[in-house]
Image (cartoon, grey):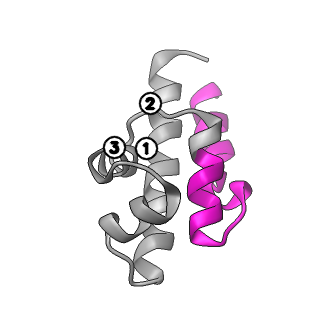
Amino acid sequence: MNEMNRSRMFKVMGENIRNHRMKQLQTIEELAEKANLDDKNLGEIERGKGFHISTCYQISRALGITVEDIFAGVDEVLTTDDE
């Protein structure tokens, strides 16, 4: 995976996290506390900064969603870039 695809993938994932957080009317600080993360770090993740799969799991658990929910739309971005 090239760096451009990697960057787009994390941007989509960050947007998914933000959308689920906002649907639940949670602040970044509230979700960060539930996920045992620093709120600044979570803000960076929502803006597309890369993160480890273990962090993805922590966030999904804190939101009550699946890891697949966080990855939603990633395949479309990567498939479009491959064409």
Determine which quarter of the picture holds residue 78.
top right
Determine contact: label 1, label 2, CB under 8 Å.
yes
Measured in 3D between alpha carbons, the distance from the residue under mark 1 to the one under mark 2, in whole angstroms, is 6 Å
Of the 4 image quadrants, the one containing the C terminus is top right
Q: Residue at x 62, y 60 (%)?
A: 60
Q: Quadrant of residue 7?
A: top left
Give the SS element for disc 3: helix
Residue sitting at 45 percent across and 32 percent down?
50
Residue with the mark numbered 2: 7
Question: Label 3, label 1: how many angstroms apart (C-alpha)?
Answer: 14 Å
N-terminal of the two: label 3 or label 1?
Answer: 1
For the image, the number of numbered tags is: 3
Q: Amino acid at mark 2?
A: Ser
| Vertical relation: 77 (above or below) 2 | below
Question: Which amino acid type is shown beneath numbered disc 1?
Answer: Lys
Q: Residue at x 51, y 71 (%)?
A: 20
